[in-house]
Image (cartoon, grey):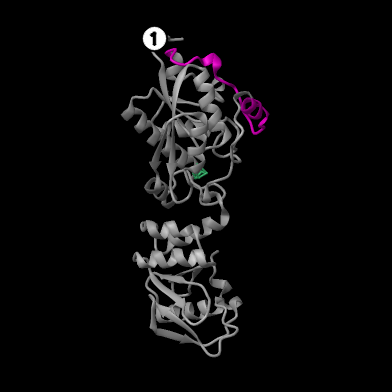
Amino acid sequence: MNEERKCRGLSLISGGLDSQLAVKVLEDAGAEMEGVCFATPFFSPDAARKAASALGIKLHVIDFTDDEIALVENPPHGFGGAMNPCIDCHATMIRRAGELMEKLGFDFVATGEVMGQRPMSQNKQSLGVVEKSSGLKGRLVRPLSAKLLEPTIPETEGLIDREKLLDISGRRRERQIELAAKYGIVDYPSPAGGCKLTEEGFGRKLKDLRDHEGLRDRRLVELLSVARRFRLPDGAGLILGRDKQENAVLKEAAAGGVGTLLAPVNCPGPSAILTGEASKDDFETSLCLIAAYSRCDRLDGDVKIAINGNAEGAIAVPRPYCRDRFKEYQIC
Ligand code: SF4
């Protein structure tokens, strides 16, 4: 091994066990490690921050929203089980990490990928696709499965000790659990958790937004994490708050220019944002839908719904409406 200088690696940190082990194994193999993680409205960097802090390494956070949206719109290698473009997402993250590597003078990028762990995105072929499309050929180290893969440049140059790298493969987790005990890693989320793009319900909302308003307005993308969604017959969208907190989020978004705010003023009920060019019919359907979700049992008369907070001009909507009537419009 080359003793003249300590080589520097930049490791993708998700917060999960494998990404933490990758750092530990590479440190044992002689590298000085820092971490990089990604932030989007679909996954938070919080777990990565916690892991980096426990590992005692510096963490770089990259805003990945525009990249992820472009991939959701057009994933060259398709989606996984939901709206998760995992192969392309992973390759793009590695490409972005590679750009940071160049900029900050690191020797290589590392990941905690394990060959064969995920049938779609971590088989030998997918690992090859990811490496090729990331543009990092020879500079992408997967320390947990390195001995099953071609030696990388830092290994052949003796910057890291290949003998200290591992040969883990498959979906069983025993070796990772043993290594976690060895390195004293106790805090890590489940391997699959954390990314909303893998959730079926979230995927339905995202697809609906992509196919109607589109994904260019980040504010609408950020709202995907809250509230019920309806797509009305003429194409307008309705985002309906489920509790006080979500109502407040919707009010704030509308104040910032997102859609038209609709909310009952004479009984408790949901705030809602109407998006897109609403036809007269869609507008009226929205009012009825909000009335159906309002708690108007003790109300003597119509539900009054204000547009953009204008209580004086509130529109009277007869009641009651059965919620079931609107089920066919509900996305999630
Ligand atoms: S689970 Fe989410 S963050 Fe991870 S690779 Fe897939 S799409 Fe990207």
Q: Is mark 1 within 8 Å of ligand 1?
A: no
Using the rendered image of the protein, determine whether residue 31 is visible from the camera's viewpoint: yes
* In the image: residue 50, left or right of residue 9: right
Q: How many marks?
A: 1
| Residue 154 counted in the magenta span | no
Report the span colored magenta. 157-181
Which residue is located at x 41 percent, y 16 percent?
A: 6
Report the residue marked by disc 1: 4
Observer-nearest residue: 324 or 11?
11
Observer-nearest residue: 32 or 283?
32
Q: Is residue 22 above or below residue 213?
A: above
Q: Residue furthest bottom?
A: 301
Quadrant of the rendered image containing residue 132:
top left
Using the rendered image of the protein, determine whether residue 113 is visible from the camera's viewpoint: no
Q: Is residue 295 above or below residue 72?
A: below
Secondary structure category for the residue under label 1? loop
Residue 24 at x, y percent in the picture = 53, 24
Residue type at the position of mark 1: Glu
Residue 295 at x, y percent in the picture = 57, 78
Quadrant of the rendered image containing residue 107:
top left
Residue 225 at x, y percent in the picture = 49, 57
Observer-nearest residue: 141 or 100?
100
CA neighbours of label 1 inside 10 A, class few (<14), some (14 to 19), many (20+): few
Which residue is located at x 41 percent, y 50 percent?
A: 69
Q: Look at the image and tell me in which quarter the C terminus lies.
A: bottom right
Which residue is located at x 55 percent, y 90 percent?
A: 300
Residue 232 at x, y percent in the picture = 48, 73
Q: Residue furthest left?
A: 103
